[in-house]
Image (spheres, rainbow, N blue to C red):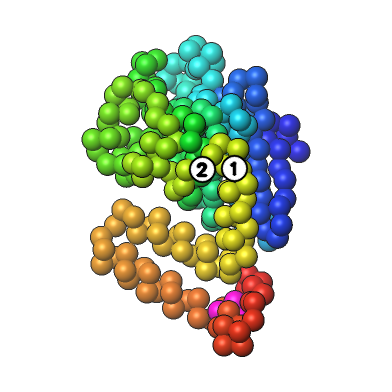
Amino acid sequence: MSELVNEERHGSGTVLLRLNRPEARNALSDALRKALTDRFAALYDDPDARCVVVTGDERAFVAGADIKVMAEMGTAEITRTNIRRMWGVIAHCPLPFIAAVRGAAYGGGCELAMHADIIVAGENAKFAQPEIKVGIMPGGGGTQRLLRAVGTFKALKLMLTGEPISGREAFEMGLASECVPDDEVLDRALELAGQIAAMPPLAARRIKEVVLAGHDTSLEAGLMLERRTFDTLFDTEDKAEGMRAFIEKRKPEFKGR
C-alpha cells in the first residue's frame, strides 16, 4: 500500500482513498499522481468496489501541482510526465466517484474534484484555478469542466483572477453538490457512498456512463443512448431482484449481475 494514498474499505462496497502528503498540503507530485492513478486503475476490475471517495485532510484536499518541480520544466519535460495519464484514468473510472473537499482545492485539486460525480464541500473549503498567477493556465481539464459546471462568465472570472471561492460559494454557483460544516464533510461523503454502494452496481455504472457521454452530444443522440442502455438493464439479475423485492415489499439484495 502506497503511503501517499491510504486506502480504507467502509461498509459493503465503499472505497476511501486518503491523500497523504501533508507536508506539501497534498500537492500533486509525480509520486502522488502515480499512486492515485494506480489506485483508480485497480478499482476498474475490483468486484467488491461500488463507489470511491477521495479526500485529503483538514488543511487541504489538494493544494495544486508541485510548483517547485514544475518551475524547472519546459514543454518537452511537462509533455513527458504522467499527468495526462492520471486524468484519463480517473475520468474513465466506471465507479461513482465522490470528492470530499476540506481546505484548499487549488489548481489540480479543483480539477481533481471536478472529475468526481458528486462533490461534498466544507463551508470553509477553498476552490481556485490560480494557474494564471504563475504564468500558465489550467491543464487538467479546468477550462472545460469549470465552464460546464458554472457557465462562461463565472468560470472566466475564476480563471482570469485566480481568486479562491469558499465551499459555500462553490455550492451556490453549482460547482459543489452539497455544502456542509467542515467536520461533517467526510461523514457525509461516506454516507452518500454507502447509499450508492447499496444500489445495483450495473445500473449505477450505466447512469454515470450515459450522463457523461450525453453531456456533449445532441439531445436526440443522448436520448437514443439512454433508451438503448435502459433496455440492456432488463436482462440483468439485479433488475429481476429489484422488481421482485419491490412487489414483495422487502429489501433487495443486489449482486452486480
Residue furthest left as drawn: 153
* Residue 244 left/right relative to 111: right
Residue furthest right as drawn: 1
Instruction: Tell me the quarter of the image containing the N terminus.
Output: top right
Residue found at x 32% / y 29%: 158
Q: Measured from the top left, where is residue 228 in percent x and y?
A: 40, 74
Is 126 above or below relative to 88?
Answer: above
Distance CA(mark 1)–CA(mark 2)? 6 Å
Tell me the quarter of the picture where residue 8 sits. Answer: top right
Whether residue 23 is visible to the viewer of this picture, yes or no, is yes
Overall secondary structure of the magenta section: helix
Q: Are marks 1 and 2 in contact (CB under 8 Å)?
A: yes
* Residue 199 left/right relative to 171: right
Q: Residues within 10 Å of mark 2 (few under 14, many from 20)?
A: some
Out of 203 and 88, give the one closest to the viewer.
203
Mark 1 residue type: Glu
**Residue 184 has which mark?**
1
Residue found at x 59% / y 26%: 59
Q: Measured from the top left, where is residue 136 in percent x and y?
A: 37, 20
**Residue 194 has which mark?**
none
Q: Which residues are magenta?
A: 237-241
Q: Secondary structure at mark 1?
A: helix
**Residue 180 has which mark?**
2
Mark 2 residue type: Val
Q: Measured from the top left, where is residue 91 in percent x and y?
A: 48, 46
